[in-house]
Amino acid sequence: MLYQDLTTWMYVFVRISALLLALPIFTATPVPVLIRIALCGLTAAVIAPTVPSAPPMPATIWGLFSLFFSEASVGLLLGFVCRFVFYAVELAGGLISTEMGLSMSTIFNPLAPSTTPLTSATLYWLAVVMFLSLDLHHWMLAGLQQSYLVASIGGIHLKEALLYDVILRSGRIFVIALQIAAPVMAVSFLVTLVFALLGRAVPQMNVFYEGTTARSLAGLLTFGVTCTLMGQHIANYLRRLPADLMKVAQLLGTA
């Protein structure tokens, strides 16, 4: 009995470690690796007793490696499906920075060893705070536990429907990013159009200098005014994450 429980815990540990590896908060650079391992082990110990009986331990090392690789692949796939919203938020921030002429204005992102545009970091942290405030990290763990009911250990099936679903979700990143950045892009277009007409009417005007300044100011004003609207739009997609996780798990478990 103890041997079977330990085996189930190992399988759950592999899947949940791969899932948390793709989520933005748990993979932050300042978080020590030992804390991540301990968190995954503790969560696996809580979830393992509710998981249906796992298959017996394979007789060969290659069979064990294949089963671990399968569980890790499931966790990574579920994690990246949940991460798509954050990718869209970062892309939207990059579009907004480009439209405002602030693409060179970058800050250090504590969640990754790189620098990002200022608006990207602002929207990214807004999404992270909303992810936690909406209690979605608990819903994600509950969805992971429920995923064993439809995608059991060792019962994973890859098929075209799953591929089409993942491609559709990845393509939706650009749609979400454009919807978030649409107000700033529209204002930037109007400012550019106005200064293009002024450049025709007043040839002595330095259209490039004046237009760049006006685009930056108008973009910052629009970004501040519509920040609440952007947050509501991001929240609508974040609330869908548990359902998206279960949808992908069902496609994985369907023969």
Image (cartoon, rainbow, N blue to C red):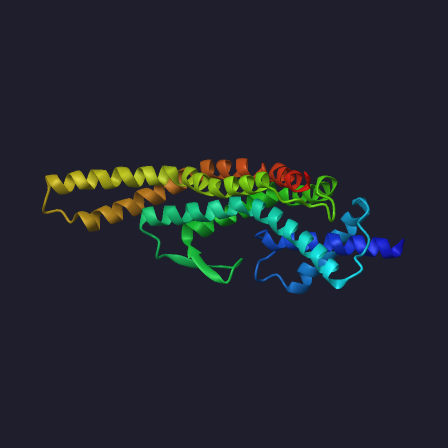
- Give coordinates of residue 252: x percent, y percent: 65, 42
Residue at horizontal 32%, vertical 37%?
186
Exactly how many numbered labels are in the figure?
Answer: 0
Residue at horizontal 59%, vertical 53%?
22
Camera-side residue of 121 and 145: 145
- Give coordinates of residue 68: x percent, y percent: 70, 56
179 horizontally vs 139: left or right:
left
- Give coordinates of residue 1: x percent, y percent: 90, 53
Residue at horizontal 57%, vertical 62%?
29
Residue at horizontal 57%, vertical 52%?
24
The image quadrant where one finds the C terminus is top right
- Give coordinates of residue 144: x percent, y percent: 69, 44
* Vertical placement of residue 40 versus 214, above or below: below
3 horizontally vs 104: left or right:
right
Camera-side residue of 117 and 82: 82
* Vertical placement of residue 225 versus 70, above or below: above
